[in-house]
Image: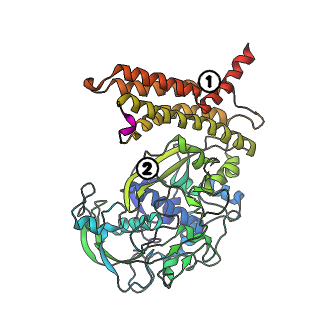
């Protein structure tokens, strides 16, 4: 199967029918495609990135004016087909005689693995051998159709977590977060969503030749054993960021005319095994993937670190670093989000787009959870952005302090000797963040519309946020403590903990700062 010429990407069209399409068909105007329809959430995110990478590599426009023309009217499918045809030779999925998509160029030997090992959450060999695959059982996926195989291969290569000695992590590090801009309009086509995440050539270097400097599988692998080498941004074309290939893999055994264990579709040929070998491409240096947020060292001594999925999921406490910049820890939005904030959003104003953030929460080789969330995106001038970052930092900082107190004094209420008790209190945090999220975004939307010369945020913003924090804090505390098992209920201890919680809340530095700013309205009115 050729991944440029043949239909293999599962989609939903405007009339809700399902289909498989070739990449160039994303621009069809009759019954247009509105969504990818992958059988797994990680495949969904990966297929978006693959198509964005294709557009960026083969169809990026000269400047923003030309980009806008294709936003307002999709290109003809003929144009896309001709543009993508330039790289079709690089996108053969099964090519025993030469280069194959995201596979080692000449892997003659290597360890044979079951095809299910392409899936990031699949248990490793030792786990299966020791019969420890309790939660994610082996043997559930024995054969994959070409469509699911291609999606699994790209998903693994772009997200590659730690895989044991010499099995390299992805170009962004293992299990990175991805942030894509998504049109807010419910009638948006897939083309518009993809195109919103493609830079013009003035913003990102294009390629004169589409060769192995972009697609690493077109040449002998840059191995990274003791006699090998690292691969830095200076060693290859910047567009390789979209096509990283840290793992040495070669698809091998196939069977015929059966149904795929993931999507259920019958296929003429299905893959059951692949070969793999360690010490593949070792990406090192100051790589910054355009679709991923990073943490930057203010002293510039450490390399940029891609933000990862975290236990507890993604919420408004992460909004600053994912949508703008969190100056407290150096987190900064992905380059595509920054470009929208500073330039592209000017054409559309606010309410055009949201930020779709997704990724795995990895514990080395173990996938603990897949997370995805949507966050608001705003176009603002520079002063507005600076103001919003300052104001949001204050609101989020106060919330972080509040949840610490809530966790501490809920534990004080629960246990006679709380410091001796070990356990996970993350469910208390999760309840608080969820309970306050809608209020935060309502206030954020108000703040984002203020002119850049506003100065201080309106005092009523702080008043409202203080009430939200206090009310939700006590509501969660009372629910958590008064609904405990009756024989463990100690009202005296609960009341003491609640009184101390109130005292610490009102005495907290971040809360007192909000109070000071909230009181200005009262003073002005008196």
Give the camera-side residue of 331 and 206: 331
Q: Is residue 447 magenta?
A: no
Residue 419 drawn in magenta? yes
Q: Where is residue 195 in the image (x, y as percent from the top left)?
A: 58, 57
In the shown orientation, is residue 91 left or right of residue 509? left
Residue 77 visible to an observer of this rendering: no
Q: Left or right: where does residue 442 sit relative to residue 104?
A: right
Where residue 17 sits: x, y (%)? 39, 52
Q: Which residue is drawn at 60% across and 60% down?
A: 198
* Quadrant position of residue 269: bottom left
Q: x, y (%) of residue 314?
A: 48, 45
Indicate the secondary structure of the residue bearing disc 2. Answer: strand
Viewport quadrant of the C terminus? top right
Secondary element type, mark 1: helix
Q: Which marked residue is nearer to the observer: mark 1 or mark 2?
A: 1
Compare residues 284 and 67 and report the one nearer the observer: 284
From the top left corner, tell me how far across and down residue 24 is, in percent: 51, 65
Magenta part of the protein: which range? 417-422
Task: Determine the residue located farthest toward the top in the rendered image.
Answer: 526
Visible residue check, residue 226: yes
Label 1 Cα neighbours within 10 Å, binned few <14 / some 14-19 / many ≥20: some
The colour scheme used here is rainbow
Q: Which of marks 1 and 2 is nearer the N terminus?
A: 2
Q: How far apart are marks 1 and 2 (CA)?
A: 32 Å
Q: Which residue carries the number 1 mark?
A: 463
Q: Which residue is drawn at 57% across and 55% down?
A: 293
The residue at which mark 2 appears reads as 371
């Amino acid at each position: 199967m050729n991944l440029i010429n043949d239909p293999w990407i599962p989609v939903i069209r405007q009339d809700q029918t399902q289909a498989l399409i070739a990449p160039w068909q994303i621009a069809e105007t009759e019954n247009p495609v509105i969504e990818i329809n992958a059988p797994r959430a990680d495949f969904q995110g990966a297929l978006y990135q693959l198509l964005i990478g294709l557009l960026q590599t083969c169809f990026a426009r000269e400047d923003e004016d030309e980009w806008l023309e294709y936003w307002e009217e999709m290109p003809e499918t003929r144009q896309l087909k001709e543009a993508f045809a330039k790289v079709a030779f690089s996108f053969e999925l099964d090519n025993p005689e030469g280069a194959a998509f995201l596979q080692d160029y000449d892997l003659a030997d290597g360890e044979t693995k079951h095809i299910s090992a392409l899936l990031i959450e699949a248990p490793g060999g030792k786990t299966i051998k020791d019969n420890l695959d309790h939660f994610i059982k082996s043997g559930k996926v024995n054969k994959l159709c070409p469509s699911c195989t291609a999606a699994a291969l790209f998903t693994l290569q772009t997200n590659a977590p730690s895989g044991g000695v010499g099995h390299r992590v992805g170009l962004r590090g293992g299990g990175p977060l991805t942030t894509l801009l998504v049109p807010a309009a419910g009638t948006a086509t897939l083309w518009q969503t993809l195109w919103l995440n493609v830079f013009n050539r003035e913003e990102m270097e294009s390629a004169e030749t589409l060769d192995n400097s972009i697609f690493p599988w077109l040449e002998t692998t840059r191995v990274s054993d003791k006699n090998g080498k690292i691969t830095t941004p200076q060693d290859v074309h910047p567009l390789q960021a979209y096509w990283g290939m840290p793992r040495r893999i070669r698809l091998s055994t196939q069977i015929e005319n059966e149904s795929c264990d993931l999507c259920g579709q019958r296929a003429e040929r299905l893959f059951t095994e692949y070969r793999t070998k360690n010490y593949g491409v070792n990406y090192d240096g100051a790589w910054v993937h355009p679709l991923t947020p990073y943490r930057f060292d203010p002293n510039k001594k450490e390399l940029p670190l891609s933000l990862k999925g975290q236990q507890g999921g993604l919420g408004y406490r992460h909004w600053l670093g994912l949508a703008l910049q969190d100056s407290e820890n150096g987190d900064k939005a992905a380059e595509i989000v920054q470009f929208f904030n500073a330039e592209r959003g000017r054409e559309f104003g606010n309410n055009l787009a949201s930020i779709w953030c997704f990724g795995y929460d990895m514990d080395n080789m173990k996938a603990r959870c897949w997370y995805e969330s949507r966050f608001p995106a705003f176009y603002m001038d520079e002063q507005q952005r600076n103001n919003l970052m300052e104001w949001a930092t204050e609101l989020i900082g106060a919330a972080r302090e509040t949840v610490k107190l809530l966790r501490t004094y809920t534990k004080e209420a629960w246990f006679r000797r709380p410091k001796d008790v070990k356990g996970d209190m993350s469910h208390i945090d999760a309840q608080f963040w969820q309970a306050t999220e809608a209020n935060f975004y309502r206030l954020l939307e108000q703040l984002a519309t203020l002119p850049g010369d506003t100065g201080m945020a309106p005092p009523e913003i702080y008043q409202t946020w203080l009430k939200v924090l206090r009310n939700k804090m006590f509501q969660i505390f009372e629910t958590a403590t008064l609904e405990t098992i009756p024989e463990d209920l100690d009202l005296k201890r609960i009341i003491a903990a609640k009184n101390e919680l109130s005292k610490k809340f009102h005495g907290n530095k971040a809360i007192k700062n909000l109070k000071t700013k909230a009181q200005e309205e009262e003073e002005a009115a008196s």
